[in-house]
Amino acid sequence: MRPGTLKQILLITDGCSNHGENPIAMAALAKEQGITVNVIGVMENDVIDEYGMREIEGIASQGGGVSQVVYAQSLSQTVQMVTRKAMTQTLQGVVNQELKQILGSEVTMENLPPDKRGEVLEVVDELNETVNLEILILVDTSLSMKHKLPTVKEALLDLSLSLNARTGNNQFSLFVFPGKRKDVEKLLDWTPKLESLTTVFNKLTPRGMTPTGPAIKEAIKHFGKKRSLKGLLSGDHDEEFYEESI
Amino acid sequence: MIMMKSFTKSQFNIKYGTIIQGKWHQNSYKVIRELGSGANGTVYLVDFNGNKAALKISFEPMTVTSEVNVLKSFSKAQGVTLGPSLLDVDDWVIGTQQYSFYVMEYVEGVHLIPFIRKNGMTWLPILILQLLKDLGDLHKQGWVFGDLKPDNLIVAGPPIKIRCIDVGGTTPIGRAIKEYTEFFDRGYWGLGSRKSEPSYDLFAIGMIMINSCYPQRFLKKEGGIQQLTQAIDASQELRKYKSVLIKALTGKYQTADAMRKDLLKILNGQTVSDQKRTVRRRSYNYNQTRQRKSRRSWVMGVIETILIFILISLLYVYYILGNIF
Ligand SMILES: Nc1ncnc2c1ncn2[C@@H]1O[C@H](COP(=O)(O)OP(=O)(O)O)[C@@H](O)[C@H]1O
Ligand SMILES: [Mg+2]
């Protein structure tokens, strides 16, 4: 199996969106284009209300990803766990698709006999280690997030430590919402080094609204920009592989 | 029969006497009691034809598959005594639901920290020596244990023997570490990568020793080796092993065996040097001075002989001249 590129949006927020498009619909739009949306809800002393919880779970399930609500202090471990889990989930989806093609419509990993399942998992593990990953991080910088931002920064540095231990390539990009003038603002363009976020992160000023939907919409476009630029340069269409199979 | 205990962390709650029957191999296991649970599943003590065994069941079928893959390759590789032996792997169907499980050897004993609290600190270095031996074998087979921590260590016996359970984090050398716990992860402390290599496990061993003297653990403040050194210095017990601990925590050991040897030295009352090279240079210098010394005494000897020879010749000349006149 050829390793392609996995595309993920990692949304870090502490509550409900209150501006612009419906974020769950935007997550659906992302998934249609082969981009997985993962959501992490950060609590401090406050709790996230019922409505916020439902939105967080809704975005992730619609976006084919994983969600988790945590207290700020366990953010680091959660961010890397959610990312890895979502990668595995997507890769398993790809492998299941292949199995169906080879063995018939009803066959998935889960209903193979345990021995065969073990062999298939080795393939998934191998892909997990070697696949290229593009991950766009979307950080909610509304006022309520103010005290949590240093922890978010730590967690993102920690994420790059985990992902950079893999053999596969990583590309990171960082957006925050709301931005200075617009709903969303790009802080970091695609880069293999997430460490460079430290300087930009320290200058952030949290403000008003929570336009989660528009942020996801903008994030999707940014994947597009990268692909077309790359396509122009190399004519490489390998990356389409996972989109079709999901 | 099965209930979600909490909203975020889903756990099993299977009652005493429940029969878990596998769909593929048809073996039946009677649940005796829960042994424990963690992030990946719940482990039950079960009865299988009158024998005790441990059964791990999970909501994630791939977690079971992944751990079974590791345990299987252990049983293939001879000499690896780490981890419980694997007995069965299957799926349990109840109603419309299906859960994967595997059955392994029941490791009867207590966790590391309660064991030390009960039996005393003397046991700590001994158990660590045992663990380093097994880890060395594991590394030679191409694996890194990964999620090494007191929760995943059971002291069995007598005879007292430390055993690793929970191979959920076990990773082939060279890949990214699959699973870890922050306090025992060198990445968290800013002291290394999350690539699986033997030194990753040896760092965790150092932290296990620290945890044994700080059962409540502690949070990262400034992190790095400074904070950990302070913790070592503040503990009378840990200070004894300071040289080994610092080397393990800063990734100076390439093999479990090297760390084991240093620990043994301390237990035998010898000192451990920081670096191998100084030892070698020092002994080289020592040889050189000794050589120089012996050469000097040789030169002195020659001079002595010549002086005596000249003196005797002079006396002889004096004697002859005295006879003539
Ligand atoms: N083979 C075994 N024998 C005895 N107790 C076990 C065994 N395996 C697991 N346990 C107990 O169950 C607990 C949880 O199991 P573990 O495999 O560590 O789960 P998790 O992967 O979720 O952390 C362990 O801490 C231990 O107390
Ligand atoms: Mg465990």
Image (cartoon, rainbow, N blue to C red):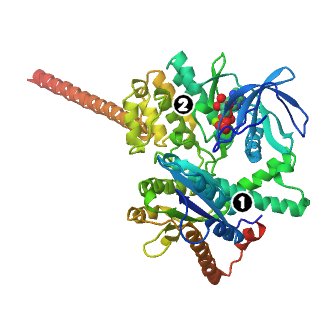
Q: Looking at the picture, tell me which residue is in the foreground, B159 or A4.
A: A4
Q: Quadrant of residue B135?
A: top right
Read off the chain for label 1: A
Residue type at tag 2: Arg
Q: Residue at x 62, y 45 (%)?
A: B179
The answer to whether residue B3 is left or right of residue A232 is right
How dense is the environment of label 1, judged by Cα within 10 Å: few (below 14), some, or many (20 and up)? many
Check residue A169 in the rendering and tell me which mark sits there, or answer none.
none
Q: Position of residue B61 (x, y in %)?
A: 77, 46
> The numbered mark 2 sits on a residue in which chain?
B
Tell me: residue B43, above or below residue A208.
above
Which residue was labeled with disc 2? B260
Q: Regarding mark 2 in the picture, which secondary structure is present there?
A: helix
Residue drawn 65% across the image and 80% down it: A231
Q: How many marks?
A: 2
At a point 64% along the width and 63% down the height, the residue shown is A37
Q: Position of residue B272 (x, y in %)?
A: 43, 31
Front one among B87 and A153: A153
Ligand 1 shown in quarter: top right
